[in-house]
Image (cartoon, grey):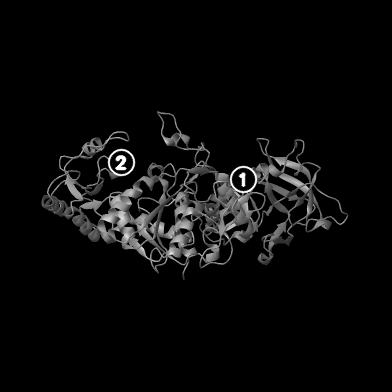
């Protein structure tokens, strides 16, 4: 089945937060091949509208591609590129390829390929074609030979350090390599011998011959190929020379007839080189557009640094729920709908900025609030004994599955003489404005009865382990026939029916908004949050969760949203806290008056 988002669910129909001033919401236009619903304008979408209007590519449809390098797992920052590439193409009835930029065999693995394909599908998209840059190695080699013959490329014997020294600076032109003007035949011979493996790694490179005095350093005879005797995860040992990204990328786009090639702003200065190769080869004129990166507070986006966390076992793996990887946030319980809405709200611009993590959490809550079933769970239990409740009696009370969705119906929850409540819901000596259970105070049990605390049992350390109460049988369902009110409603679980569960409470992985900001002598790991994970070994959950599926998402009433972890087994439930109920972003919005 085609998993691509429908037009009504493509990138920009989502509600845009009014406070996001970077998103240009002033120009609204209905897209071709779409309903008349207006959509926020952005410069890439505008370019697509214009190119279709002028038939810049003839009758060809919009063709995009998402081109990750398989050297790590995708993270939340990649979600923006995925949504742009797939969402915009889908909006205009176009196509998107998933293409792996596998030109660096020393860092690439099949594990990463598999994780990326899974993540793209989880986010809600399906590609037209699955491609690899390595599919085009033969063609790229032939085009390199053509450039050599045309006097546009040469083999250079300078070392990487010598090339760097010859390149010049932003204010000074570069110096030509002494090998720059080798005859074409000599270059062809050397390049062929490079391919056959006659030279060691780093001894020679193939460079484009452009302009060593160009103000754009990327045009100062960039390297096209380097020698690398390494096993490739797809081509094995067929090649010992590999193309550089700047050479392979544009030509791969051209081979696939990509009409709109989107990348982040750090590649803006590379666009003239992208265009130069296409023009010199006279191939399909793919065009590159750059947009702002998706940066989030308290979040690390560097794959190299995320890999360090994994390798040094500072996290449990790429899918650790504290990681910003798509596999990590999926395991934590985030939904693809929430991520897509967050990306849409971020807008598209030519200026990098940083979004609040609270904003992402807002969209997670918003989506889970609509769809997550409600259940009752007690994380830090204290026993409640209802003294005047009949010994051995068990009732079933009706509990609403989701007040936001009437079709979700109700469930039966067992109620008995001995219950568990949260430790925080009882105070023997309550402070002012504490309205939960305390000696002599009456509270409502969610869906159950009014109870009043009478006495406590303590352990040898003086801690309350058991609260004895009485209940009013006339208040079944949570209302008193005489109209009396209580100031607090607390949740509970029947002790005889409770499921034991391990619950993992996750917090931010880093303590600083920008995890990269460290003292000169420190590494970014100095900003790791030592309290980013708390494990509760003996939580008590209502019995309806006995067969909760892996990745099943629930709201534990009054506590937050939780997700079933893959570590769960029959008889051993493990839940991850996705996000607490408190919504910091909603407060920020309200305070700003938007």
When asked about the image quadrant of residue 374, the answer is bottom right
> In this rendering, is residue 385 above or below 552?
above
**Could you tell whether 557 is left or right of 68 in the image?**
right
Instruction: Please report the residue visible at 44 percent of the width from the left and 58 percent of the height from the top.
Output: 85
Q: Judging from the image, what secondary structure is the residue with disc 2 in?
A: helix
Residue 312: percent from left, percent from top:
39, 41
**Element assignment for label 1:** helix
What percent of the width, then of the height, locates residue 369?
Answer: 63, 56
**Nearest the camera: 237 or 424?**
237
Check disc 2 and report the residue beneath it. 217
Q: Residue at x 26, y 42 (%)?
A: 220
Q: Residues within 10 Å of mark 1 (few under 14, many from 20)?
A: some
Residue 585's label in the rendered image is 1
Q: Nearer the viewer, mark 2 or mark 1?
A: 2
Residue 574 seen anywhere in this rendered image of the structure: no
Q: Say which of 265 and 138 sits in front.
A: 265
């Amino acid at each position: 089945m085609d998993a691509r988002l429908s037009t009504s669910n493509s990138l920009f129909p989502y509600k845009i937060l009014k406070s996001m001033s970077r998103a240009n919401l002033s120009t609204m236009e209905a897209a071709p091949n779409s309903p008349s619903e207006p959509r926020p304008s952005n410069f890439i979408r505008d370019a697509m509208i214009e190119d279709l209007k002028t038939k810049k590519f003839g009758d060809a449809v919009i063709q995009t591609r998402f081109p990750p390098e398989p050297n790590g797992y995708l993270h939340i920052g990649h979600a923006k590129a995925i949504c742009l590439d797939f969402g915009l193409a889908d909006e205009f009835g176009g196509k998107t390829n998933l293409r792996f930029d596998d030109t660096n065999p020393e860092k690439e693995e099949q594990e990463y390929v598999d994780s990326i394909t899974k993540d793209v599908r989880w986010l809600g998209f399906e590609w037209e074609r699955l491609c690899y840059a390595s599919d085009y190695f033969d063609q790229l080699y032939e085009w390199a030979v053509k450039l050599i013959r045309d006097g546009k490329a040469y083999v250079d014997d300078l070392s990487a350090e010598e090339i760097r020294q010859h390149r010049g600076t932003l204010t000074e032109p570069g110096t030509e390599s002494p090998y720059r003007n080798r005859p074409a035949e000599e270059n062809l011979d050397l390049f062929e011998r490079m391919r056959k493996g006659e030279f060691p790694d780093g001894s020679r490179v193939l460079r484009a011959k452009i302009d060593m005095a160009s103000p754009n350093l990327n045009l100062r005879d960039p390297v096209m190929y380097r020698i690398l005797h390494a096993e490739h995860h797809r081509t094995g040992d067929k090649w010992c020379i590999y193309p550089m990204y700047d050479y392979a990328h544009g030509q791969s786009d051209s081979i696939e007839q990509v009409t709109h090639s989107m990348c982040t702003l750090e590649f803006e200065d590379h666009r003239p080189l992208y265009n130069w190769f296409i023009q010199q080869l006279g191939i399909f004129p793919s065009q590159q557009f750059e947009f702002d990166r998706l940066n989030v507070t308290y979040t690390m986006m560097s794959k190299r640094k995320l890999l360090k966390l994994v390798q040094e076992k500072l996290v449990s793996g790429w899918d650790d729920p504290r990681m910003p990887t798509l596999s990590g946030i999926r395991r934590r319980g985030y939904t693809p709908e929430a991520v897509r809405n967050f990306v849409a709200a971020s807008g598209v611009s030519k200026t990098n900025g940083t979004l609040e993590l609270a904003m992402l959490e807002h969209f997670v809550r918003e989506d889970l609030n609509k769809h997550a079933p409600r259940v009752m769970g007690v994380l830090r239990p204290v026993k409640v004994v209802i003294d005047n409740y009949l010994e051995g009696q068990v009732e079933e009370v009706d509990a609403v599955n989701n007040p936001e969705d009437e079709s979700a119906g109700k469930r039966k929850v067992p109620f008995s003489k001995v219950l568990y409540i949260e430790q925080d819901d009882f105070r023997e000596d309550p402070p002012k404005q504490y309205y939960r259970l305390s000696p002599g105070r009456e509270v409502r049990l969610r869906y159950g009865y009014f109870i009043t605390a009478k006495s406590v049992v303590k352990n040898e350390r003086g801690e309350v382990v058991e609260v004895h109460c009485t209940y009013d049988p006339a208040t079944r369902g949570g209302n008193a026939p005489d109209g009396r009110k209580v100031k607090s409603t607390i949740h509970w679980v029947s002790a005889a029916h409770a499921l034991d569960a391990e619950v993992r409470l996750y917090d931010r992985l880093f303590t600083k908004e920008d995890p990269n900001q460290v003292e000169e002598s420190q590494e970014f790991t100095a900003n790791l949050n030592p309290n980013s994970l708390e494990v509760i070994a003996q939580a008590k959950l209502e019995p309806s969760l006995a067969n909760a599926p892996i990745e099943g998402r629930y709201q534990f009433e009054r506590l937050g949203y939780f997700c079933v972890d893959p570590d769960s087994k029959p008889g051993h439930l493990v839940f991850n806290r996705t996000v607490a109920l408190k919504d910091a972003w909603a407060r920020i919005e309200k305070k700003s008056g938007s």
